[in-house]
Image: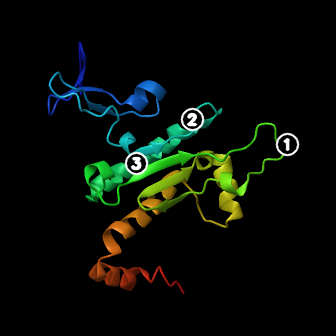
Amino acid sequence: MTDTTNGSQCVRCESDLKKCKNRVDHEVCNRSVVAPTATDKSASPFCDCCRYDDSIPDLSVEGNLESWRLLEQAKRRLMYGLDSLGLPHGTIADGFVSGLSFDFKGDSIAPQSLWRTVGTQERVFTGHAGGKITINIREADTVEREKLRIDLGEGHRTLIGHFRHEIGHYYRDVLVDGHATYKTEFVRLFGDYENPT
């Protein structure tokens, strides 16, 4: 990429570029997007990673911006890995039946509460369902993540590990379930995930 008087330009494709909207507005991204032209204004303001975000943390809560920044870094590493492996991914708008998307949310805790407890309906659980990967932003806090690692008796617990684990569920749904041959081979190699022993 080279700097020009009106922004940046990709050296290889000679396209005019601009910073991702999440980079401009919040400094949580380090990527660029193709700038809209006079004839085509349909270019997305979000880069090829940020466009997968369905929800972001409440940025009015102290610390959430930095947590979101760390989550986005881990997500970019994940997406780079998927692209390097040639694994398919896209949103519903791209025509994927199980479109990939991300929710980054935090537990709701009443500010006047003396005890740091949360009601059952206000708790955010990290997981995957139907193409949506939800990550509790608490995982971005090294101390909180280490407490959970010890409580759960895990050998290690990392942000990129969460993303890789949850994307595994996504690809099992997309590439294995519904494909009898692949599912049989998957179960032979990795065990029956529906009936673990």
- Eye-nearest disc, 2 or 3: 2
Residue under numbered circle 3: 77
Q: Indicate the position of residue 24 as horizontal and vertical percent values.
A: 41, 25
Residue at 42% over, 60% down:
167
- The quadrant the N terminus occupies is top left
Residue 101 appears left or right of 44: right
Question: Which one is earlier in the sequence, the residue at label 3 or at label 1?
Answer: 3
Q: What amino acid does circle 1 point to?
A: Leu
Question: Which one is earlier in the sequence, the residue at label 2 or at label 3?
Answer: 2
Callout 3 secondary element: helix
Q: Indicate the position of residue 86 as horizontal and vertical percent values.
A: 25, 58
- The quadrant the C terminus occupies is bottom right
Q: Is residue 103 visible?
A: yes
Disc 2 and disc 3: Cα gap in Å? 17 Å
Residue under numbered circle 2: 66
Callout 1 secondary element: loop
- Eye-nearest disc, 1 or 2: 1
Disc 1 and disc 2: Cα gap in Å? 25 Å
Pick the front one: 161 or 179: 179
Residue under numbered circle 1: 114
Quarter-of-image position of residue 16: top left
Is residue 188 shown above or below 49? below
Residue at 39% over, 40% down:
50
